[in-house]
Image: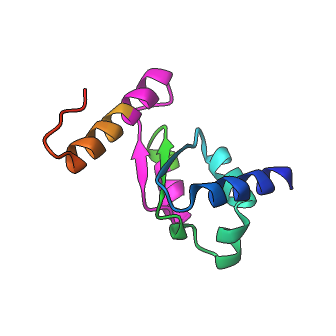
Amino acid sequence: AEASQQWANWMDALQNQPALVCINSVETLQHLQTVDQRAISRGNFSLHDNITLLVPGERVTRAATAAGFTKIVTAKDATDHAMLEAIIHTVQSTHTASSTGIRHD
């Protein structure tokens, strides 16, 4: 119950701002599915348009897609290096797409 309340508080604080959530395994994804009461009540995790999941490989990507998540960044593997590399690439891509001529290094 505490995890559910913490997740709900965090989602309320986000107010639809973009967020990156690191999911390290299918088990972690399953735990998220049990604590996200709003999505459970709607039977749909795609309602979280502001949430991007960072996952460590194709197996977790498939599980997240099956759960209804639509924004997923897949790292090459579960190592810290690969996960950080995926985050950096995602942030740089986002900044490049929204840039007004300013380079973000």
Q: Position of residue 6 (x, y in %)?
A: 76, 51
Number of numbered labels in the structure image: 0
| Residue placed most toward the observer, 38 or 28 | 38
Task: Classify 30 as above or below 56.
Answer: below
Q: Residue at x 57, y 43 (%)?
A: 23
Q: Residue furthest bottom?
A: 42
Is 47 inside the magenta-drawn segment?
Answer: no
| Residue placed most toward the observer, 87 or 64 | 87
Q: Residue at x 73, y 67 (%)?
A: 37
Q: Residue furthest left?
A: 101
Task: Classify 75 as above or below 14.
Answer: above
- The residue segment tinted magenta is 61-87
| Residue placed most toward the observer, 92 or 16 | 16
Q: Residue at x 85, y 51 (%)?
A: 2
Q: Residue furthest right?
A: 1
Q: Would residue 23 be found to the left or right of residue 83 on screen?
A: right
Q: Position of residue 65 (x, y in %)?
A: 48, 60
Quadrant occupied by the N terminus: bottom right
Is 78 inside the magenta-drawn segment?
Answer: yes
Q: Would residue 11 be found to the left or right of residue 22 on screen?
A: right
Q: Would residue 7 be found to the left or right of residue 84 on screen?
A: right
Q: Position of residue 59 (x, y in %)?
A: 49, 46
Q: Quadrant of residue 4?
A: bottom right
Q: Position of residue 33 (x, y in %)?
A: 68, 59
Quadrant occupied by the C terminus: top left
Q: Quadrant of residue 88?
A: top left
Task: Classify 80 as above or below 4.
Answer: above
